[in-house]
Amino acid sequence: MKSNQQSTEFSWRVFLPLCIIGVIVKLAYPSISTWVVAAFIMFGVLFVYRKVFIGGLVASLNRGRTNPYLFSEDYEKAIEFGTEQIAKHPKDIVAILTRSTAYIYTGNLEAARADCDAALKLDPKSVYSFSNRAVISLQQDNLPAAMADMEAALSLQPDNAVLLYGRGIVYARMGNDEAAQKDFEDAIEIEPEQAVTYIGRGCLAFKRGDRASALIDFKKARELSPVTHQFNAALAVAEFAAGDVDSAQKRWQLLPTKYTHYADPDWQRRVLGWPEAMTVEAGKLVAGLSLPEASS
């Protein structure tokens, strides 16, 4: 599977030939100004890489409006912030989709779906609108709808690691572990720093009884994103299953209970994507602890 990133080597393959052409033109026509030749080279580079430059600018502008509360997992504030941004910029798809994500985590799936539909009206090719809507369908156990949206997104960006991970999760829920494994492997090849994919692959390993491999993948995910609570939860379960009870208990007790039901097997299955083998181990882990009840 090819990487979706432009390489530095390829940029020199474009720049050097343009320089050579410029020198040849200058030698053949000495009267041509050096500034004209330089302008030719620069315009050539800009033409070849116009999508990269423009895309980078758009991404930079969007980052300025990224919802800061989403990444700190303060989802109620993320919804408030997103609503304020949408009021100021009604066509800001980034604000709409980040609010949709916050709605998903608070369990307001209908509001989350409405945001996805609104984003798709603004941009029918918005891949993350399809992706978010697939997550919603997955939580509602509507697997055919989830797969349809993931396929729609991947038809637009087939080498997108986030989307491949998402389809892998759907395949795993459908019981097609072989297809799920391939999607996770492809996603890791494209974007090895994407932590969540290791969680997906680790869950498959746990499901087939390879707890050592699951523990390695969960540790890798936490190494890449140490503050993500869901990754710590998965690692705690793997540690518990491996016999490291003290570490597992300490890690589990640090999990928040305000927005998510980490001790609820159905929530673990629908939201975290854990296989039954993990929910069973999590139940054993929780049974030995005194934890506050999660709010609804």
Image: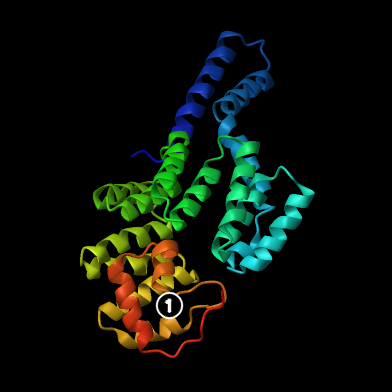
Residue furthest to the left: 209
Q: How many marks?
A: 1
Instruction: Specify the quadrant that holds the C terminus.
Output: bottom right
Percent of width and height locating residue 255: 48, 78
Residue matched to label 1: 263
Instruction: Please give the name of the residue rendered at 44% of the width and 54% of the height, measured from the top-left corner.
Output: 138
Question: Residue 160 is drawn in which quadrant?
Answer: top left
Instruction: Please give the name of the residue rendered at 68% of the width and 22% of the height, measured from the top-left corner.
Output: 35
Instruction: Specify the quadrant that holds the N terminus.
Output: top left
Instruction: Using the rendered image of the protein, determine whether residue 143 is visible from the camera's viewpoint.
Output: yes
Which amino acid type is marked by label 1? Ala
Percent of width and height locating residue 104: 55, 59
Instruction: Using the rendered image of the protein, determine whether residue 222 is visible from the camera's viewpoint.
Output: no
Question: Residue 91 is drawn in which quadrant?
Answer: top right
Residue furthest to the right: 88
The residue closer to the viewer here, 38 or 99, is 99
Crowd tier of the residue under label 1, counting other residues whose Cα lies within 10 Å: few below 14, some 14–19, many 20 or above = some
Percent of width and height locating residue 118: 64, 43
The residue closer to the viewer here, 29 or 260, is 260
Instruction: Please give the name of the residue rendered at 38% of the width and 56% of the height, measured from the top-left corner.
Output: 197
Is 226 situated left or right of 51 in this image? left
The residue closer to the viewer here, 30 or 115, is 115
Percent of width and height locating residue 34: 66, 20
Is 129 situated left or right of 189 in this image? right
Question: Residue 26 is drawn in which quadrant?
Answer: top right
Instruction: Please give the name of the residue rendered at 65% of the width and 55% of the height, measured from the top-left corner.
Output: 66
Q: Is residue 259 above or below residue 24?
A: below
Q: Is residue 193 above or below residue 241?
A: above
Give the colour scheme shown: rainbow
Question: Which SS class for mark 1?
Answer: loop
